[in-house]
Image (cartoon, rainbow, N blue to C red):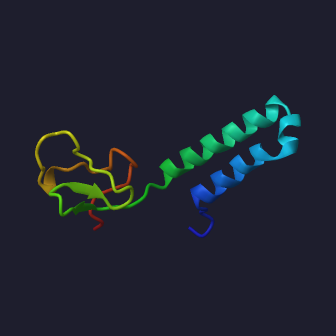
Amino acid sequence: MSDLISRQPLLAKIRKIEEEPDYLHKGEDWTVGLTIAERLIEIAELAYPKKGKWIFTRYYTWECSECKQNPTAGMGYVQRKEELFEFCPHCSADMRESS
């Protein structure tokens, strides 16, 4: 889709509004509006999940290609790729192989 936007730059702009001097005079409704906008962005991100893949690292662990987190940290053993999650438990990236 051509109308998708990047989440981080948009959130940065919303948060920058909070730093403006006039922001303090805009009242509680303005604060609520910004909070709602941030939540809507988070919900929209769930509607269009990231695609990722599991990467086996040199430390004999797996990591997500999107967030670089280990999905099995603290489990005490290294899982086979076939045993890993279909979605990253940290960033919700879809790890299923595309057909």
Which residue corresponds to the image point at 18% horizontal and 54% vertical from the top-left? 61
Which residue corresponds to the image point at 84% horizontal and 36% vertical from the top-left? 24
Q: Nearer the viewer, residue 74 or 4?
A: 74
Which residue corresponds to the image point at 68% horizontal and 43% vertical from the top-left? 37
Which residue corresponds to the image point at 40% horizontal and 49% vertical from the top-left? 91
Q: Which of 80 and 99 is in front in this view?
A: 80
Up/down of 18 relative to 93, above or below? above
Q: Position of residue 77 (x, y in %)?
A: 10, 45
Q: Where is residue 45 in the image (x, y as percent from the top left)?
A: 52, 51
Q: Where is residue 7 in the image (x, y as percent from the top left)?
A: 58, 56
Q: Nearer the viewer, residue 48 or 41?
A: 41
Task: Check the picture and name the quadrant holding the C terminus.
Answer: bottom left
Left or right of residue 63: residue 16: right
Furthest residue in direction top, as rendered: 28
Task: Check the picture and name the quadrant holding the N terminus.
Answer: bottom right
Up/down of 21 relative to 52, above or below? above
Left or right of residue 90: residue 60: left
- Which quadrant of the view contains residue 43? top right
- Which quadrant of the view contains residue 6? bottom right
Left or right of residue 78: residue 73: right
Left or right of residue 82: residue 28: right
Q: Nearer the viewer, residue 25 or 97?
A: 25
Q: How many marks?
A: 0
Q: Position of residue 59 (x, y in %)?
A: 17, 58
Up/down of 95 relative to 23, above or below? below
